[in-house]
Image (cartoon, rainbow, N blue to C red):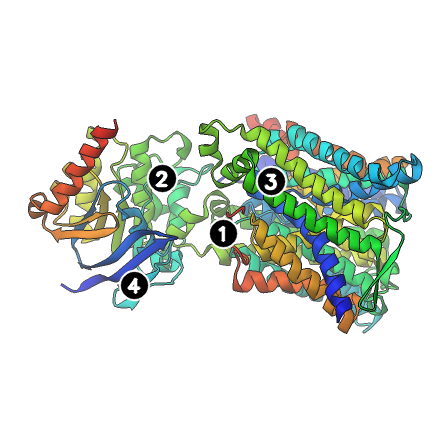
Amino acid sequence: MTDLLEVNGVTKRFGGLTAVKNATFTLKKGEFTGILGPNGAGKTTLFNILTGFMQPTTGTIHFNGELVRELAPYKIVNRGMARTFQLTRPFVGMNLLENVLVACMSPRASNDKDKEERASYLLAQVGLGGRDKEPVETLPYGDLRRLEIARALATRPDLLLLDEPFAGLGSGEIEQLAQLIRRLHREQNLTILLIEHKLREFMALVSRVIAMNFGEIIAVGPPEEIVKNEKVIEAYIGKTEDAHASA
Amino acid sequence: MRRISLIDIAGAIVLVAILALAPMFVSSNYLTGVLTVCAVYGIWASSWDFMSGLTGRENFGHSLFIGAGAYTAGFLATIWSTNPWLSLPTAVGVAIAFSLLVGFPTLRLRGPYFALAMLSASAILQRLCLIFWEYTGGEEGLYGLDPLIKSPLHYYWFVLAVLVVTVIVLTLLAQSHWGLLLRAIRGDEATCQAAGINVTFYKIASLMISAGFAGLGGALYAHYQLQVSPPLFSVVVSITVIIMVYVGGIGSIYGAAVAAILLTLLTEMLRGFGEYRLWIYTLTLMLILFFLPNGLIAPLWRRLTERLR
Amino acid sequence: MLQILIYGAVSSAIYAMLAVGFTLIFGVARILNLAHGSFYALGAYAAYVLTSLLKIPLFLAAPLAVLLVAGFGVVMERFLVRPLRQSQLAVLMITLAVSLAVEQALFLIFGSEYRNVPSFVAEKLSIGGVDISGQRLLALVAGVLVLLTLWLFIQRTRLGAAILAVSQDPEAAQYMGIPTNRIFSIVIAISAGTAALAGVLVSPFLTVQPTMGLLPMVKAFAIVIVGGLGSIPGSIIASLILGYSETIVAYLISTSWTELVSLVAVVITLMIRPSGILGRRAAF
């Protein structure tokens, strides 16, 4: 296995605040990795940096051996790194098919001859089959997440970044979505990087965890080791105590 | 995507037939002239709608492209005295060059930069026309353009044909995958980026198309008036076009063209009001903003033909 | 040399008065006010009506004109802009409609010919061998004073702090009990008032005519883009840059070319540093 993504010394400062501090890690092809950390640990900022939506203050990012820092977000997508947003942002006024169709127009997907057919196929793949003409406005949260994933898949990614896909979902929906993600990972040999702040969903899915707190990576390892890591426990339990204290 | 249905095509054919035949029944050069201006405004309004209506990037200086096209025709005719037909493609080219000049620095940015830059650029160009009067003829403008076609009626038919082609081309583009992307850009640029779409490219390309048609309309107008003058660049021209699109229903293209024709006719009828005309226009705009945010023509047509689809 | 220094300072002061109000209402209420130039024109016409037609003494007419225009701004924001604030395009359209309506109204009432407003100060002053009209000097002094007062107001008063808070985070400010709508009214009053004052001050030495608002507004756009949308210090710095560049260009080449200065400045800014000299979001 080779390194698909290589992140080296990435730091992001906003004024006096350091949101991400010296993040260094690699992802291998076909790996399923999760970034764990309490809210405000810098996970989404790191995602935004990886996908080009923000520029790091310092540090380098190599994807497939190519330096992608300072590339526009759409260029990074067309190099094979696709993402979803924590707050789903569908195109309102369009139906489900059209929403996915937009991504089928990306240069990376240009080999697909019949774009409508492919968009329809992708919708079926994420469990939204037969609902092509439905408007997005009425879609429940869980289905919006699936739509986001279909849109990301349309760009034929090598690496899929999922930003808190389970946030705001009920336990039944979480289980279904987790199955979908697991299936995509297995069947399409997708490399997946997933953000989550709750431990439970995580452990059953990922094979490796990158734990963050206050913008820093505090531990890397398989999930069963991470749950025993003192720093991680401290970050989480400390957090809970604070929450209780302030409640 | 809303596909064109048979009833739309039937409606379009009837409307174009009425417009084309109207001068045959009421034979007057005055009416032919008014209708020619109607068709020109139709080209301007539908070209505005293609870029700004679909992508949601408000162009407040469409008169920049209109004026650029018209003055190109003026310069070609008065200074170089070339074949007048040459002015049409040249005007398109010059207008597109201007669109790149303004669009390239501003359309990659988010925020209101594009709207401000277009408004400023057209205002500044109007000033430059006055300042460099040795070349532009100042307030008087440039005189003595040759008509493209001698007969006013035949010229009207030609301009009407250009309008029809413009609306067809722009509608087909808007209904294509391309148009889908432009509407997606209107929705959310970040999501477009995440979908791997080069947002800036599509915005600039659609502005180029919009500018090209506006410049073409400008040259057609110049060859109708047989003169060009600085008010072509004025904010009033831009706002008139935007009001037309608003009345037509933003993003529908055909609505913009129909509204342009109706409002131009209305303006002619209001000629008796003289200086109050612009007031009436402004008032119309305010009323529409408050009471008909979706416009009048396109929603009305959809309502009327709902059962026939 | 001294002449450039003084004349540049006068143009800069007038530009700054226009640009600060424009950027303030954008920074606080996110309203891109295309009717800003009308405030300037209305100020000049109000001064003309009050002094030449109603024969009110100047020192009374000037504040009255400013108050009238500030009131106009408040009414416009409350009844025309606020109901449409959901849509950026609608706000742009309605403010543009207002500016056209004002221009047409002025045209219909006063005609297109130039109007004259008597000078506040008739004397000419001579500084270091350069003759400068007292009126221009007054514009400079008044401009500096207004900007200083505005700065003190925002920095030192409770109301100023509330304005700052709204500009940084309108939602949070609302939760903290700041009445954002009232703040908007106050800010548009300040914005319209400073623009009107600029109009009043220039009315004796520039031409007063219906379309006089458009070009200064275009300059205000340019300044605000160069300085950074929403940043008041940025727009003051940009006013100085633009005011002086134009004066130098007028002196070295010809006044015809001054119009190009703002265009070039905007293009360079957007190419190199699109967020402007001092970036967005920092109201003060």
Secondary structure at numbered mark 2:
loop
Report, in whole angstroms, how far the alpha carbon at label 4 lies from the one at label 3: 43 Å
Secondary structure at numbered mark 4:
strand
Kindly indicate whether the residues beneath marks 4 and 2 are on one polypeptide chain.
yes
Q: Amino acid at mark 1?
A: Trp
| Residue B178's disc number | 1
Pick the quarter of the image with the N terminus of chain A. Answer: bottom left
Instruction: Give residue C3's position: percent from left, percent from top.
Output: 78, 67
Q: Amino acid at mark 4?
A: Gly
The residue labelled by disc 3 is: C153
Q: Which-is-in-front pick, marks 2 and 3? A: 3
Is residue B170 shown to the viewer in this render?
no
| Chain of the residue under label 4 | A
Q: Amino acid at mark 3?
A: Phe
Does the CB distance between marks 4 and 2 fall below 8 Å?
A: no
Identify the mark nearer the N-term, 4 or 2: 4
